[in-house]
Image (spheres, rainbow, N blue to C red):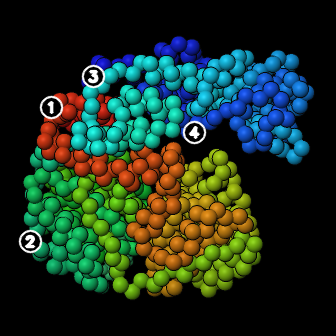
Amino acid sequence: MRPDRLNPLFAETGSLKGVGPQLARPLEKLGLTRVRDLAYHLPDRFVQRRVVTDLDAATVGENILVALTPLEYRSSAGRGPFRVMASDAAGNVCALTYFGRNGGWAKKQLPLGERRWIAGRLDQFGQTLQIVHPDHVSEEGATALGQVCEPIYPLSEGLTQGRVTALVNQALAMLPELPEWIEPGLFARMGWPAWREALQEAHKGEHREARERLAYDELLANSLALMLVRNANRARVGVPLKGDGRLRAKLSLPFGLTGAQKRSIAEIEGDLAQPSPMLRLLQGDVGSGKTVVALEAMLIAVEAGAQAALLAPTEILARQHHETLSRMAAGTGVTIALLTGRDKGRARESILMGLLDGSIDIVVGTHAIFQDAVTYKNLAMVVIDEQHRFGVGQRLLLTQKGRRTPHCLAMTATPIPRTLTLAQYGEMDVSRLDEMPPGRQAIDTRVVAVERMGDVVGAVSRLLAGGGQAYWVCPMVRESETDDIAAAEARYAELRELFGEDVVLVHGQLKPELKDAAMERFAQGQARLLVATTVIEVGVDVPNATLMVIEQAERFGLAQLHQLRGRVGRGSEKSVCLLLRGDTLSETARERLALMRETQDGFHLAEEDLRLRGGGELLGTRQSGDTPFRIATLDQIQRLLPLAHDDARLLIDRDGGLTGERGEAARLLLYLFERDWGVQLLRGG
Ligand code: ADP
Ligand code: MG
């Protein structure tokens, strides 16, 4: 249970003064449902404003506070902005511009003929002065006037800077004093403020130390929680699995294993022999040969008289794995079954029976293999493919099937950088397949200006005519997924006109059956051109596909481009990847595309991706969707996570039950960052 002293922080925002249902909705949109969320709703930036009475005295680009009287509303046709024309005391006219809004909100704030104080950045549009999305509109200028350094918060429609500032201040006033959870030596060395002070300072100005401390807290909470999972797992009873090698000896592989594969298998074998269940991540680029490693691991389990299961994220991948594994293991006499949500009636019954009586050694499938109805005779090992689709919570659930905790091997094809691996899989041991099987042909990667679309279509046409297959990736770039799908559908229609029945379309809003059917047609070679949004990132192995076209490649991150490109270059034929780019490229976009041309090493690209996105700016970018963090920036993650990780480990080694003085404080931290599943494990033991 959450400690009482934190309760005020977890009170709903509705309990604050001045928050009714009207305000609750836009707050919720920003994820601000509790007092705690407001306190952690950190400003994007701070501005220094100048008060001007006459717009003539202000310069374009300046942050100003000015009294204006609205004269007229102007809505534009279509998707254009809504404008409120207003004038200052000297009669200068300025437009207050609102994009993507119907004007209702602006009208309410800016009644015609009534003077308002407007704070914002003065801009120019043609000959007209304008302020786009003013930061403040208020009847009284005095509150804003009083602030020299003013926080600018992320907003949603229906909120104003003034409102959010007032609510944040209410939340800050409610912060309790909490004991320190940071290791005293580190705390002193860093010169960080205490928790409450840090939160208060972070809202008042660009206090680097305060921001650092708050980021560190978040990282520490995450590391602690993962460490607790790790500890709890160690304390669980598993079945030590020692294989005698008899099945593995019968594997007839058409190739020798790479050094990295051998090393990983040895690491897994070492884990399996232990009584505490394995929790290991196998990280390896697309094509690095994870499947055979998984097979060897599962065979160890079978040699030891147990069953193994392989969980895939989609039906089609499950089927593909089943085929591959069955082929590779043909000479071993091992029984490998496939179970997906599609199996019904007799077929399903017979598989369930086989799992129960132990006549099935290995089962491959989707989530269906973990449904309650499925009972295993002796499941001792679980392989999870494409790990990144699961959160830690789900991971925990999966491994709780059965009386004894099975050994768990998670596999991911996303070669994320070391620091992020720590953040996301800190509770696991990691094996890396950092060596590609020999004889892989480099993928010929070229950056092509979009004006040369005609040539690109020509290349596709020649390839298809010669019996080849290709991918065509449409980007996810617009505001809404629906727009993206519309764009993909338009492209699909065009290509279909050229290539007819050979073309199929796959996107995220397609019904799973339809998506699977389209993928299947492509995999079987019936369809020759697969037009897709980024959904093809995961999975499918079609060695005959040797060309990939990626539209607006500059919009993708490096990791994503790499992941996409990995779909080609899987057969013996030379493969080509064409990165279509627009006219205007940012410096980083240029660098990204150049890197794609230069290297195919996923781990290298992942590190570079982090570097390019990390930036060094003070407030940084927080919205990076691939980290589990909301406060810590990529830059802070890189610098502070290793510290937090070590700190967490030391604390858990010393006080695994978190019962000491610092341990108690650390519990507060876990609740504060809602990593309390970590604490829950303490009790469950
Ligand atoms: P991943 O799942 O890591 O993307 P796969 O396991 O599908 O990669 O392997 C990709 C391809 O490489 C498969 O065709 C596989 O048979 C082949 N392969 C795996 N290991 C080796 C190896 N050591 N030498 C040559 N080919 C290999
Ligand atoms: Mg794979």
Neighbours of disc 2 within 10 Å: few (<14), some (14-19), many (20+): few
At 51% from the left and 24% from the top, the residue drawn is 168
At 42% from the left and 73% from the top, the residue drawn is 601
- Residue 302, percent across and down? 16, 64
Task: Please tell me which residue lies in front, 410 or 377.
Answer: 410
- Residue 560, percent across and down? 51, 62
> Which numbered disc covers residue 660?
1
First along the sequence among labels 3 and 2: 3
Task: Please tell me which residue lies in front, 18 or 478.
Answer: 18
> Which numbered disc covers residue 45?
4
Q: Which residue in the protein does label 3 denote? A: 3
Residue at disc 2, CB closer than 8 Å to ligand 1 = no
Neighbours of disc 1 within 10 Å: few (<14), some (14-19), many (20+): few
Q: Secondary structure at mark 3?
A: loop
Q: Secondary structure at mark 4?
A: strand
Q: Name the amino acid type tagged 3.
A: Pro
Q: Are marks 1 and 3 in contact (CB under 8 Å)?
A: no
First along the sequence among labels 1 and 3: 3
Neighbours of disc 3 within 10 Å: few (<14), some (14-19), many (20+): few
Q: Secondary structure at mark 1?
A: loop
First along the sequence among labels 3 and 4: 3
Q: Is residue 63 above or below residue 251?
A: above
The alpha-carbon separation of the residues under discs 3 and 2 comes to 51 Å
Task: Please tell me which residue lies in front, 474 or 497.
Answer: 474
Q: Name the amino acid type tagged 4.
A: Arg
Q: Nearer the viewer, mark 4 or mark 2?
A: 4
The alpha-carbon separation of the residues under discs 1 and 2 comes to 45 Å
Q: Are marks 4 and 2 in contact (CB under 8 Å)?
A: no
Quarter of the rendering occupied by the N terminus:
top left
Is 174 positioned to the left or the right of 350 in the image?
right
